Amino acid sequence: MSWLCYIPPGIEIAADKLKNAWDKNSDGGGFSYVKDEKIITHKGFNNFEDFIKVYNNESNLIDFPRLILFRNAYTNRNEENCQPITINENVVFAHCGFLAGFASAPQKSDSILFNENILQPFLQNDFKKVYSPEIQWIIAESIGYSSLVFLTKDGKASILNAHRGEWSKEHADLWFNNKDHEYPKVASSYQAPYYNQNSQTWTPKSKTEPEPYLTWLRKCYFAAKEQLKNEQEFAGQG
């Protein structure tokens, strides 16, 4: 689960809080903000030092609405899959979670595929559809347990499935999808496994032996994959 945050104008998050979030979600990051009805996005950061340098160098950033996402991914770790993602010049979005039906293709995350196949065609002619409660409900239903935030050139944010995250108790309209920013990462020798799209195998990030439950998850994954393949072949025969 990645770390996603919407920050309204006039509010800042301390650098140490951002560092806490990055340390638990270090597979790439980025941010967008709106200034003079223009969306400006910086992403593709591979380390926190590069991120915070660019973030702090943006002039008067506190005066503008912002969207930040630090990625925690099992596959397709590359700069192209960093978020926020541009739908068009009028609107960007950031998503955390899993999008059923949009399994990651080689070099593309489920968020990228969802954008290319659903959001871009749907919002091509009228980005203000994201303000519609009916449209928000439809998209929220389609993304399941995920959270998704739109940010438009008007400086407005639409947070879908906001109840799966939390609103700040100190600042109105400040929203996080989780509490990764609140505490530093606890040191551990274990690191989550990584799915290699080319070899189609799970490989631990380090030489540390995976926990037993991960071995079980691997077996479940490959069993489900084989079952899906058999079902597709059976359907083709019909």
Image: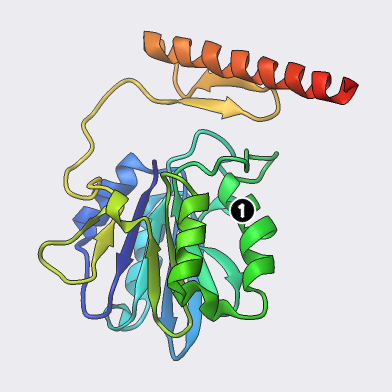
Q: Name the spot of residue 38 as percent of width and height, x first.
A: 50, 85
Q: Which residue is mark 1?
A: 114
Q: Secondary structure at mark 1?
A: helix
Against 21, residue 171 (above or below) is below
| Residue at figure coordinates x 31%, y 43% from the top left | 23
Locate the N terminus and report the quarter of the image it occupies: top left
Left of 127 or right of it: where is 191?
A: left
Locate the C terminus and report the quarter of the image it occupies: top right
Q: Name the spot of residue 49 as percent of width and height, x first.
A: 36, 55
| Residue at figure coordinates x 44%, y 91% from the top left | 36
Viewer-closest of 135 and 71: 135
Left of 224 or right of it: where is 38?
A: left
Q: How is the image coloured?
A: rainbow
Viewer-closest of 218 and 136: 136
Q: Name the spot of residue 206 as percent of width and height, x first.
A: 44, 21
Against 148, residue 40 (above or below) is below
Viewer-closest of 50 and 63: 63
Extreme bottom residue here? 36
Q: Name the spot of residue 92 as percent of width and height, x first.
A: 52, 69
